[in-house]
Image (cartoon, rainbow, N blue to C red):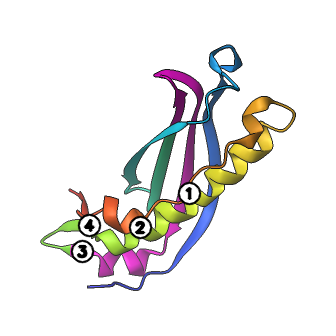
Amino acid sequence: MNQQITYKYSKIDLEQFAMFEENYDAAVNEVKFQTDIQFSFDKGNNVLCSKIIITASQVEKPVLKACLCSYFEIEPESVKNLLQDEKIVFNPFLLVQFSSLCYGSMRGVIYTKTIGSPLNSFILPPIYLDKVIDKAFVVS
């Protein structure tokens, strides 16, 4: 079920950004990216947070780590529409939407923050978040 909700993208917060250029080896072509996705919800303010944590590594050594949070203010009426058995249920379709916006922002952050460094050649690869996020986020 694809629920329609009204929300506002209210804030982006870069919680962590670190480059480990000493671990970077220009002779190694492969860079592996690990992506972690987390969600939280502030019931008092109707704000959903989508957190993306990216770790880029070469030969098992981290070369970059970033954590970005995107905050979305959900309209109170929309929150009511998400209620199921007195719990707020964000279905995977909605979570994919929120995390996609955050992931795209992360791509821009990495590009901007690495300008002038050898890590600027890294491009955060596309990811099919609908293949990753397959469970609802339930708030009691």
In terms of sequence position, does the residue under pointer 3 or pointer 1 come before the other? 3
Question: For the residue carrying disc 1, how many other residues have a C-alpha within 10 Å: few (<14), some (14-19), or many (20+)?
Answer: many
| Kind of residue indicated by mark 2 | Val
The question of residue 81 being in magenta is answered with yes
Determine which residue is flagged by label 2. 96
x, y percent for residue 84: 17, 74
Q: CA distance from mark 4 to mark 3?
A: 5 Å
| Of the pair 107 and 118, the residue shown nearer to us | 118
| Of the pair 91 and 55, the residue shown nearer to us | 55
**What main secondary structure does the magenta stretch of the protein show?**
strand
Residues shaded magenta = 55-83
Q: Nearer the viewer, mark 1 or mark 4?
A: 1
Residue 125 placement: quadrant: bottom right
In terms of sequence position, does the residue under pointer 1 or pointer 2 come before the other? 2
Q: Residue at the spot x=32%, y=78% of the render?
A: 80
Residue farthest along the top direction in this orientation: 22
Would you say 94 lies left or right of 120 here? left
